[in-house]
Image (spheres, rainbow, N blue to C red):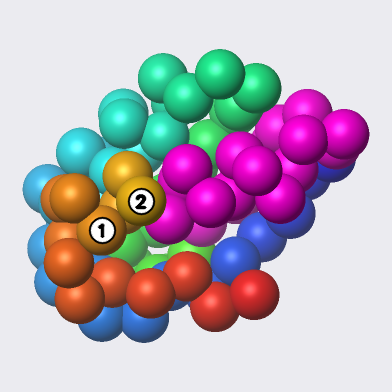
Amino acid sequence: MKKVFQLEDLDCANCAAKMERAIAKIDGVDSVSISFMAQRMAIEADEARFDEIMERVAKACKKVEPDCRIVR
């Protein structure tokens, strides 16, 4: 399943790259792309576990950029 989410308060391109690398390591994530300029994240992950994976994605984002929010 592929979905696109809006990101709020993503402050720098370096943080976006760090978040992308951290999310890519999560089990069940097939691909992820974060655009700092568009403030968007496209993620493709296992459909059966998508909600569980998104919880882990949110935690990974908070570690890199505590103010960043994923808008569903």
Most foreground residue, 2 or 69: 69
Most foreground residue, 63 or 21: 63
Above or below: residue 1 compared with residue 35 = above
Asked whether the residues under the numbered discs 2 and 1 touch, taking CB atoms below 8 Å apart as contact, a structural biologist would say yes
Specify start and end residues of the magenta stretch as a single range: 41-58
Quadrant that contains the N terminus: top right
Residue linked to disc 2: 59
Quadrant that contains the C terminus: bottom right
Above or below: residue 19 compared with residue 61 = above
* Residue found 61% across the figure and 27% down from its top: 29
Check residue 62 in the rendering and tell me which mark sits there, or answer none: 1
Q: Position of residue 19 (x, y in %)?
A: 29, 43
Q: Position of residue 45 (x, y in %)?
A: 71, 33
- Mark 2 Cα shell of 10 Å, populated few (<14), some (14-19), many (≥20): some
The local secondary structure at tag 1 comes to helix
Q: Is residue 9 left or right of residue 70?
A: left
